[in-house]
Image (tube, rainbow, N blue to C red):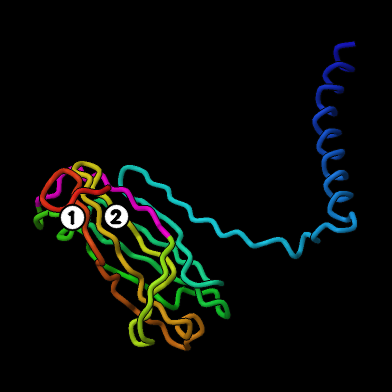
Amino acid sequence: MSSNVSLKRMLAPAGAMLVAAIAFLAGSMMPGRLPVASWPRVQAMSTLSDETFAVCTAPIDMSMEGFFMLDFETGDLTGGVLNPNTAKFMTTYRYNVLKDLGFKPGQVQNPRFLIVPGRASFGGNSGNRMAQSVLYVTDGSTGVTVAYGIPWSPQQSTAGKAAIAELIPLDIARPRGGGPRVP
C-alpha cells in the first residue's frame, strides 16, 4: 500500500506539468493570440561573486553579449565578446579599477567589490561608439562606485583579428562624502 502512495506522490507533479504544458500550447494556438515566435525577446544580465572574483554578463548590442570578470586581488577588470562565426573571444577588454576607487598601489587589503551591469544608450560619432551597457564597480567598504563604458563597434564582432580595448571610466559616485551624493 505504501508503494502505491509513494508512486502517486511521484506521478502527481509530472501529471500537473503535463496538463500545464497542454494548456499552454492550446492557449497559444487560439485565434487572436500571438504565436510564441512573435513574442518579444528578453535579454538578461547576470552577476555572481565569491571572495576573490566577481563576474557578470552585459548586452553589447542587439545580438551580442559580453562577459566581464573583476579580480579582487589585482583590481583587473577583464572581459570579452565572442565572435559569432568562430565562437572565440575576438574582442577583449582590460582595465585596473584600483586607482579609480581610491586605492593606492600595493595597499589593498581584503578588498570587497561588487560589479553590476546596466543598460545605456550613448550618442556620439562613429569614432567614439560605446556598447549598450555600462559596468558599475563598487568598493564594498566605502560605497565608491565607478561607471565604466565599453568601447564597441559592430564590425568588431566579425573582425578577422582579435582586438584589445580599454574600458573607459565615465563617472564616480562617492556616497560618503568627497563629491556629490548619490540620489
- The numbered disc on residue 101 is 1
- The outermost residue toward the top is 1
- What x and y, as percent, mark residue 125? 36, 86
Counting residues from the start of the chain, the first of labels 2 and 1 encountered is: 1
> Label 2 amino acid?
Val
Q: Label 2: state its secondary structure.
A: strand
Location of residue 8 with respect to 129 vertically, above or below: above
Q: In which quarter of the image is the N terminus?
A: top right
- What x and y, as percent, mark residue 73? 23, 52
Residue 126 belongs to magenta span: no
Quarter of the image holding residue 136? bottom left
In the displayed structure image, the side of residue 176 where residue 18 appears, left or right: right
Question: Is disc 2 in contact with disc 1, using a CB cutoff of under 8 Å?
Answer: yes
Location of residue 19 with respect to 181 vertically, above or below: above
Location of residue 99 with respect to 110 vertically, above or below: below
Q: What residue is at 49 percent from the left and 80 percent from the top?
A: 157
Which residues, given as a range, are shown in magenta? 107-118
Nearest to the observer: residue 138 or residue 52: 138
- The numbered disc on residue 137 is 2
> Label 1 amino acid?
Leu
